[in-house]
Image: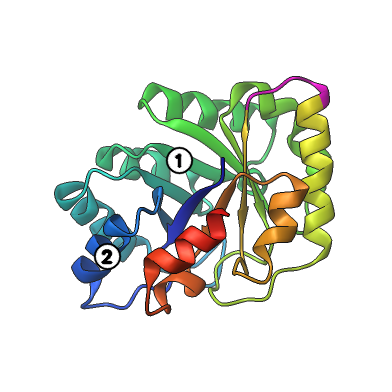
Amino acid sequence: MIEISTSFLNIIKGKESEIIFGLEKAKTDYFHIDVADGKFVEKDNYKYMFELSSYIKRISNLPIDVHLMVEDVKKGIDDFSSVEPNIITFHLEACKNEEEVFECINLIKQNNSKVGISVKPNTPIEEVYEFLPYIHTCLVMTVEPGKGGQTLLSEMVDKIATLKKYVDENNLEIDIEADGGINLKTCEAVKQAGANVLVAGTAIIMAKDYKQIIDELKL
């Protein structure tokens, strides 16, 4: 089953509640909170995304999917655990070594959230394999993280397929999430490759009818 996580990276300020309730009605599966610190990626929306997550928690029961695009992963986990997200995903590239990756995994679990690890386009997917038995989601960035509205990098489809093959061969139960440039033209390729959670922002937020787009992305 395909699930949709709607990204709030480029949400229109001042229309938050209207968009949240519209997405809820349209049956998005998750609210995807892209947290950027101005260091790991160029954009800095850390404070706003924390405030937005807290607001969502107060007015909606839909699961929150936090994507930490930050250098200080442990601080991000500590801060965003307070909004009780369904899942917290951090970047493999933000950790100095294997020990730090496991520390972050355990910290997220201690805060009662599911664990995701994300890999940037230039990171070989094989680098995440050793951590897959301990996490719930692997997020494959299909664009460079931090900017909305980019075009999906076609070679990332093969990366998803490679991951899916490894997951199946090793009988792992894990969601494969694709994030970046996902729209009605590109979604079929990533679904065929093995992604079962699609992160879409611009394609949904800029649409006149959220439900129509979400339904079509799920087909």
Q: Looking at the figure, which quarter contains the C terminus? A: bottom right
Give the number of callouts.
2
Under mark 1, the amino acid is Ile
Q: Position of residue 102 (x, y in %)?
A: 59, 26
How far apart marks 1 and 2 lie (CA) works out to: 24 Å
Q: Secondary structure at mark 1?
A: strand
The local secondary structure at tag 2 comes to helix
Q: Is residue 86 left or right of residue 200?
A: left
- Which residue: 15% across, 52% down? 59
Q: Residue at x 49, y 48 (%)?
A: 72
Q: In the rendered structure, which amino acid carries the disc numbered 2? A: Gly
> Neighbour class for label 1 at 10 Å: few (<14), some, many (≥20)?
many
Per the rendered image, the range of residues in magenta is 169-173
Residue 179 can be seen in this image: yes
Disc 2 target residue:
22
Q: Is residue 174 above or below residue 64?
A: above
Question: Position of 155 compared to 65: left or right?
Answer: right
Residue at label 1? 88
